[in-house]
Image: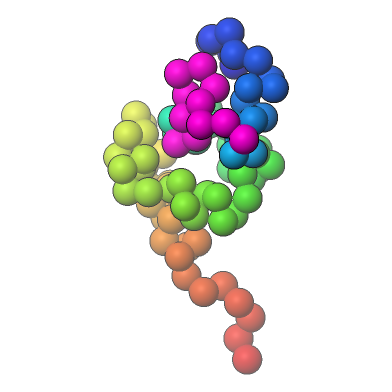
Amino acid sequence: MWDYTISVEDLENLLSGKANRAGHYTKQSLFLKILETYPWFTIIQFFTIEEIKSLLTDDIIKKLKMPSLRNKYEFVKKRLQQDLSPAK
């Protein structure tokens, strides 16, 4: 981590579900930090769409510091909840 001494291995274990914490981060708090720091195309390299659907809660969105990010991820959450399968 860029502002804490947390090993890459600990972060990988947290992201893969092998650990509940990496330093003081939970998966949810790390997700929040990543949302505030990285662009969408980087985020989807760290998390699957199913993980994002699970982690992108109203509570997480409310904790985003910038109003523009809250608006962006409210939109993303709505889009991910829609059925995006091709029309028959």
Residue drawn at (59%, 14%) of the image: 6
Query: Residue 79 location in percent, x, y?
Result: 47, 62
Decide which of 33, 87 is in the foreground and name it. Answer: 33
- Does the magenta run of residues contain 23? yes
Decide which of 76, 45 is in the foreground and name it. Answer: 45
Query: Quadrant of the image for the N terminus?
Result: top right
- Does the magenta run of residues contain 26? yes
The single residue placed furthest to the bottom in the displayed view is 88
Measured along the vertical axis of the image, is residue 47 above or below residue 24?
Answer: below
Decide which of 69, 53 is in the foreground and name it. Answer: 53
Residue drawn at (63%, 22%) of the image: 10
In terms of image quadrants, where is residue 85?
bottom right
The color scheme shown is rainbow
| Number of dots carrying numbers | 0
Query: Residue 65 location in percent, x, y?
Result: 34, 29
54 relative to 17 in the view: left or right: left
- The secondary structure making up most of the magenta span is loop
58 relative to 16 in the view: left or right: left
- Can residue 36 be seen in this snapshot? no
The span picked out in magenta is 18-28
Query: Quadrant of the image for the C terminus?
Result: bottom right
Measured along the vertical axis of the image, is residue 56 above or below residue 13?
Answer: below
Residue drawn at (58%, 8%) of the image: 5
- Can residue 20 be seen in this snapshot? yes
13 relative to 24 in the view: left or right: right
Residue drawn at (32%, 34%) of the image: 63
Query: Residue 31 location in percent, x, y?
Result: 50, 35
Query: Residue 68 location in percent, x, y?
Result: 38, 39
